[in-house]
Image: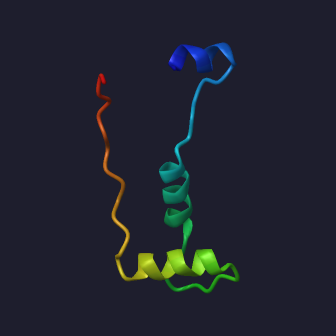
């Protein structure tokens, strides 16, 4: 799969969880946001209901 992506000119891939965590890190716990989604994420963050992402080691499967 990696070779196929390289042939298409794709060097890196950002996963959804990485992008989501980057957004969550930027949210302030005590600020109000106009977006419903950002408000939900802010509340989850404020009440520590979101865990830090866990590093996963690649497996040969």
Q: Residue 2 appears at what percent x and percent y?
A: 52, 19
Point 56% across, 41% down: residue:
14
Q: Residue 4 appears at what percent x and percent y?
A: 59, 16
Extreme residue in the front direction: 61
* Viewer-nearest residue: 3 or 61: 61
Q: Residue 9 appears at what percent x and percent y?
A: 69, 19
Point 51% across, 20% down: residue:
1
Q: Residue 27 appears at what percent x and percent y?
A: 55, 71
* Viewer-nearest residue: 47 or 6: 6
Q: Image height check: is 44 above or below 25?
A: below
Question: In which quarter of the view is residue 51 placed?
Answer: bottom left
Q: How is the image coloured?
A: rainbow
Point 53% across, 79% down: residue:
40
Point 32% across, 44% down: residue:
55
Number of residue marks: 0
| Quadrant placement of the C terminus | top left
């Amino acid at each position: 799969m990696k070779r196929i992506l390289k042939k298409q000119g794709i060097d890196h891939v950002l996963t959804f969880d990485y992008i989501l965590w980057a957004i969550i890190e930027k949210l302030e716990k005590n600020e109000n946001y106009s977006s419903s989604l950002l408000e939900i994420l802010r509340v989850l963050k404020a009440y520590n209901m979101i865990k830090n992402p866990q590093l996963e080691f690649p497996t040969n499967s």
